[in-house]
Amino acid sequence: MVVILIGLTIRFFPDDKSGDLNTISPIVTTTQTLETSALQSVGTPIPEQLRLLAICSGIDAVVDEDTCRTRFDKSGETLSLGEPVIFIPSISVSAENLEFSINGDATPILLGNIDAVISDLSVDELHSIRIRFVDAEWSNSINFKVSLQPPGAAHLYGVCADLICAPGQPLVAPLNADKNAYFPLVELVAGLTDPPTQHIWIELMLNSDDSFIGCLNCQAAEAAEVSYDDRKEFGVTGIFYNWDLKNLPSGTYKLQARLRNRLHVGDWSAEFSFEVQRP
């Protein structure tokens, strides 16, 4: 006998490709229903129609069906523009075997593209989504709208500089760095779709100092006429970053992140601690 997990979906969010020096969302998000595992005899699989149980916005590592449905209901059955979408199917399915359809269109959409497609939908109009195994029958549909919602939580999981990354290692500041040398902090944050959209961006705060707020996906902020004028330019590349390691004294630093769109500002994340050392 083998155990078949019911309602397990694994979602991969690759690296950000925007012009900022940052990496957004190279984490795995797993969504799972509350249904119990079913036992099936080896060699005698029982075909089952794939059903879409729930959808909601967010980046939770694990979220159950009831939590996702509650979140969706509280949002007025609306998905948040620019945030990843969690899909909970009735049975286990790998990413390469899953296809989506929007608004009854028979053209299948792959998992890696569905967030971008949803973020491009018309605001406040009723849409629908369904899923299927590749070349199989389509599931039931779930209706939804999209709009700028109060954003969910951002997740900070690393900070890098000069090819060294925390939390695994302390960041070693350069000794007597040349004024034309650059050692930008690269903040690793999950919370945006891949690629990021023009709907939402990330704000950063170091050591609870709100006199300087950094940002990621700053093009979206600029489109919303929100500026971050104190960011540093990497030479004359037109690429900007938030903090330079060579300017940070030795010590423990605490970084926080939050999501923001033109209408709403999210809550600050839990603190991510990292060490800076000087030789």
Image (cartoon, rainbow, N blue to C red):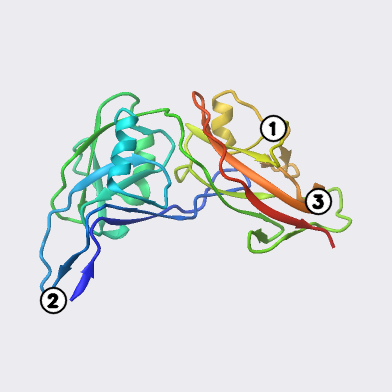
Quadrant for the N terminus, please. bottom left
What residue is at 76 percent from the left and 44 percent from the top?
235
Q: Is residue 184 visible?
A: no
Horizontal and vertical percent position of residue 267: 54, 35
Mark 1 = which residue? Answer: 210
Disc 3 element: helix
Residue 149 is situated, as x and y percent measured from the top left of the image, at 42, 29
Circle 1: is it few (<14), some (14-19), or many (20+) Cα within 10 Å?
few
Judge whether 268 appears above or below 162 on screen. above
Which residue is label 2 attached to? 43
Q: Is residue 51 left or right of residue 32?
A: left
Q: Is residue 120 above or below residue 164?
A: above
Quarter of the picture holding the C terminus: bottom right
Q: In the rendered picture of this protein, how many numbered marks are placed on residues?
A: 3
Q: CA distance from mark 3 to mark 1?
A: 21 Å
- The amino acid pointed to by label 2 is Gly
Q: Secondary structure at mark 1?
A: loop
Front of the two marks 2 and 1: 1
Q: Amino acid at mark 3?
A: Lys
Check contact, mark 2 vs mark 3: CB within 8 A.
no
Q: Is residue 204 left or right of residue 223?
A: right
What residue is rendered at 68% in x and 47% in y? 254
Q: Residue furthest right?
A: 176
The answer to whether residue 234 is seen in the rendering is yes
Tell me which residue sits at (57%, 37%) in the image.
268
Residue position for label 3: 246
